[in-house]
Image (tube, helix red, strand yellow):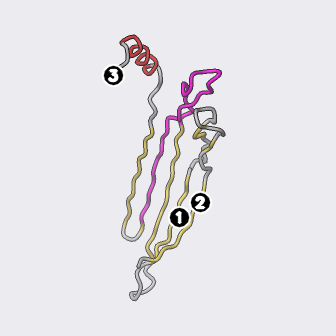
Amino acid sequence: MRDSRLSPERADALAELNSSRPVKVIAVTGGKGGVGKTTVSANLIYGSGLRSGDFPEVAPNDTHATPYVSVNTGIAHDVHWSTDYKPLTVRFDVVNLFDRIYQLRTGDGIGEFAPQYGARRGYYFGLSQKL
């Protein structure tokens, strides 16, 4: 049976190749708080950019897309219409508060065939009744 371990030279070459690449980071943080019947929420999403690279020009996955940050926020309020019914929740959210245009993938990595962008600013309104 053949030994599948790498030779020391090959292991050193791979370690050197991987040490020159930046590490991909995705961070998500959020907060929620409220007084009484009102709740305010916010979250921040940071992505360091997916790996990319078109094979004929550079090694596959040798570069990264541009890092991005997206901030989302919302507010919700419980409205008590009657003592016979549970409260109605009225909610308003803003996605991508600062309307940043950011690229999720460039379209030139392995298995990528078209660039993809994150959502532009969006406003969402909702009503929900507790059961």
Relative to 49, residue 128 above or below? below
Looking at the image, the residue that sits furthest to the top is: 9
Q: Which residue is at the front of the view, 57 or 90?
A: 57
Amino acid carrying mark 3 in the image: Met
Q: Which range is magenta?
A: 39-67
Say which quadrant the C terminus sits in.
Answer: bottom left
Amino acid carrying mark 2 in the image: Tyr
Residue drawn at the location 57% of the way across and 22% of the way down: 59
Which of the two discs, 1 and 2, labels the residue nearer the N terminus? Answer: 1
Say which quadrant the N terminus sits in.
Answer: top left
Q: Which residue is at the front of the view, 11 or 26?
A: 11
Q: Which residue is at the front of the view, 91 or 36?
A: 91
Residue drawn at the location 38% of the way across and 59% of the way down: 33
Which of the two discs, 1 and 3, labels the residue nearer the N terminus? Answer: 3
Looking at the image, the residue that sits furthest to the front is: 1
CB under 8 Å between callouts 1 and 2?
yes
Estimate the spatial distance between the alpha carbons at disc 1 and disc 2, rounded to whole Å.
7 Å
Q: Residues within 10 Å of mark 2 (few under 14, many from 20)?
A: few
Looking at the picture, how far across and down is residue 90, in whole percent? 50, 71
Tell me the residue that label 3 is attached to. 1
Q: Is residue 55 magenta?
A: yes
Q: Residue 77's mark?
A: none
Tell me the residue that label 2 is attached to. 123
Looking at the image, the residue that sits furthest to the bottom is: 84
Q: Residues within 10 Å of mark 3 (few under 14, many from 20)?
A: few
Tell me the residue that label 1 is attached to. 92
Looking at the picture, how far across and down is residue 80, in whole percent? 43, 80
Looking at the picture, how far across and down is residue 119, in whole percent? 60, 50
